[in-house]
Image (tube, rainbow, N blue to C red):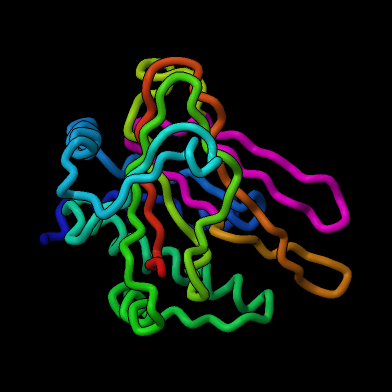
Amino acid sequence: MTAGPWWSRVGAADWPNVAAELDEYGGAALPRLLSDAETIAIRDLYEDEDRFRSTIDMRRHRFGAGEYKYFARPYPDAVEALKQALYPRLLPIARDWAERLGRDAPWPDTLDEWLQRCHDAGQTRSTAILLRYGAGDWNALHQDLYGELVFPLQVVVNLNAPGEDHTGGEFLLVEQRPRAQSRGNAFALPRGHGFVFTTRDRPVRSTRGWSASPVRHGVSTVRSGRRHTLGLVFHDAR
């Protein structure tokens, strides 16, 4: 696999601003990471069963309504390159959050080293996801933890055009604030653009320094059309 254009697209983000928005909201917009042609190519993989290790019916498992599939390895070039390019940009944020919260920061300098640690701990199953929603489908609020070893940030990329290919289907973040009611945010993700958000929680100032504010994510009901999403998780699953 060659680096292709994906490393430069990731590098084009205003990463200090991304870090600031993650601190404030638990999520932040990223620039366009996939071209229109690339979004179509990834969407079209959905019917190729050889590219996936498993399929999940969300309604059956009471996760919402819709369907998603876990990619098998090797990942498509764009998926692998985006994961490799994003990890070193997200790593300083992850380490900073861990320091504020007084947690260990077990993440090494490269994604390959980190995934090897996951595998050594028994987390060997691939976690890159392709999700497909139709009219009436939605995704319940949840966290993608998968095991004891967790990278605290993950990324989604919308593969369709809101308002053209689908209506509804906004990306949701709901934060359980300490000693306060929950706060929700909804984001309409442009086609091919990324969004980075916390996997589990974010640090917030408290009277005793810093505390962890849990955050869950989901997708609002798709009112019409079809919506596909690429999900990039930076730890593997048991």
Q: Residue at x 56, y 49 (%)?
A: 27
Measured from the top left, where is residue 70 in percent x and y?
32, 51
Number of marks in the rendered image: 0
Residue 174 belongs to the span the image colors magenta = yes
Q: Which residues are magenta?
A: 170-197
| Quadrant into which the C terminus falls | bottom left
Relative horizontal placement of residue 15, taking residue 141 as reference (left or right): left
Whether residue 42 is visible here, answered yes or no, is yes
Quadrant assignment, res 214: bottom right
Pinpoint residue 77: horizontal percent, then vertical percent.
16, 54
Q: Using the image as rendered, state which of residue 207 and residue 151 is in the foreground.
A: 151
Left or right of 45? Residue 144 is right
Identify which residue, 208 or 179, lies in the foreground.
179
Q: Is residue 31 visible?
A: no
User: Which quadrant holds residue 57?
Assistant: top left
> In the visual, does 187 lie left or right of 118?
right
Q: Position of residue 79 (x, y in %)?
A: 25, 52
User: Who's the residue at 60% across and 44% down the image?
Assistant: 141
Q: Residue at x 56, y 30 (%)?
A: 220
Note whether 37 is above or below 183 in the view shown. above
- The quarter of the image holding the N terminus is bottom left
Residue extending furthest toward the left: 1
Image-based side of 42 in relation to 215, left or right = left
Residue 154, image x and y in percent? 46, 56
The magenta stretch spans residue 173: yes
Q: Relative to 37, is 203 above or below?
A: below
